[in-house]
Image: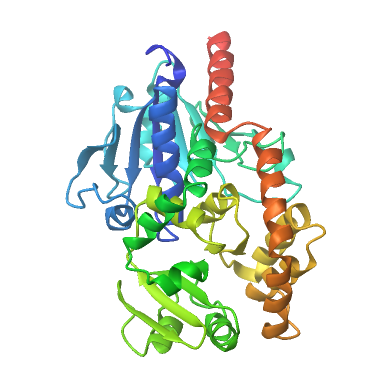
Amino acid sequence: MLPHSSTASTLAIFCKVVDNYGDIGICWRLARQLRHEHGVAVTLWVDDLASFRRICPEVDTAAALQHVRGVTVRHWTGQDGVYAPEDVAGIVIEFFGCDIPPGYIEAMARRTPRPVWLNYEGLTAEDWVEGCHRLPSMHPRLKLTKHFFFPGFTAQTGGLLCEQDLEARRIAFQGDQAAQRAFLARFQLSERELGARKVSLFCYPHAPVAELFQIWAQGEEAVACLVPEGVAAQAVGEFLDAEPVAGAAATRGALSVRVLPFVAQPDYDLLLWACDLNFVRGEDSWVRAQWAGRPFIWHIYPQDEELHHKKLRAFLSRYATGLPALQAFSLGWNGAVAPDGWPQAWAALRDELPAIAERAATWRREVLAHGDLATKLLDFARELGRAQENQI
């Protein structure tokens, strides 16, 4: 627990929801971990409470101020507003450069001591991140300095979000077949589905889902594809020949597709742990898939000029060395290359799954050896706080 007088005893996170669930997903995980593992009083400012509620059902979408699991949640309704220095936290996190309200920044400059101001950047495996992590950026007018904080996969970055007890909980769940069946029973999976290769599917709309469904349906191996409601709606609806609402399911050939209700974050971890293969998207579910100990395919958030393909290749060069089928399938899934044929790509990936699972275990150990993000973030904030005190 931190002493109340320390710079890191209070913290504010400003989050604008762009990618529906990824942005708020990361901020909510960070807020909870800082509160429950480090004793920080966290205020989470978020502009889209409806998306927040999808991953945390306790959220009241009509409340301007509420307390959820020990975290103060404020509805961020715009850039206007007048703030006093006492309204400002000791650490202020601007998530993905979301532009904190000008009035809040003015109050930051009047606060004594001035807060530590961090711009929490997006996760990438590109080499340049190590040189940009922790770099300062001075405010053009006020006596404030913002520092860039980059999550990452090496010791020279900010690490990844990972709760202290996550690995123990995962091992216990994956070692308990009864617990897995009980969890999946909540979604009315049949005995056939429970015995099939279970695949979770979370992707952006442009993913080649229909092609994959056709391959699975025509294959000899039973596959149960579990899709959160609203994901790949066109392809799922066409397969079901019905509205892809939660609870809808259909079987064609060897493939069963079942639409799940959107689940809270802790249950999404269980879903990843219970499946044999996970398709994930964006950043939040991508990181959780890395902790799940299962093979996964990442659908990266698309960017202009196809910059996302460069980021994808950078990650694959770190993660998938010696796994050619994983590399080829991932590049094809993201439209970075045209696969020789989806049937061949899936067959090669399926054969490589045991080796991918082994890599998942070694990767987890490698990344965690560098420390978890929440701890590294607070250590950096304390360092900056001490430096500011010495300048006074």
Residue 146 higher or lower than 389, as above or below: below
Q: Position of residue 84 (x, y in %)?
A: 29, 26
Identify which residue, 177 or 322, lies in the foreground. Answer: 177
What's the residue at 63%, 59% (across, down)?
295
In this view of the protein, can residue 177 be seen by the observer? Answer: yes
Residue 230 higher or lower than 61, as above or below: below
In this view of the protein, can residue 132 be seen by the observer? Answer: no
Q: Is residue 4 left or right of residue 158?
A: left
Q: Position of residue 103 (x, y in %)?
A: 34, 37
Chosen colour scheme: rainbow
Q: Position of residue 299 (x, y in %)?
A: 58, 66
Where is residue 35, by image quadrant?
top left
Q: Is residue 119 left or right of residue 343?
A: left
Where is residue 277, by image quadrant?
bottom right
Specify the farthest residue to the right. 322
Residue 76 higher or lower than 236, as above or below: above
What's the residue at 53%, 59% (across, down)?
282
Q: Position of residue 345 (x, y in %)?
A: 71, 78
**Count of number-bearing discs:** 0
Identify which residue, 185 or 48, lies in the foreground. Answer: 185
Identify which residue, 367 or 134, lies in the foreground. Answer: 367
In the picture, the quarter occupied by the N terminus is top left
What's the residue at 38%, 40% (across, down)?
102
Specify the farthest residue to the left. 62
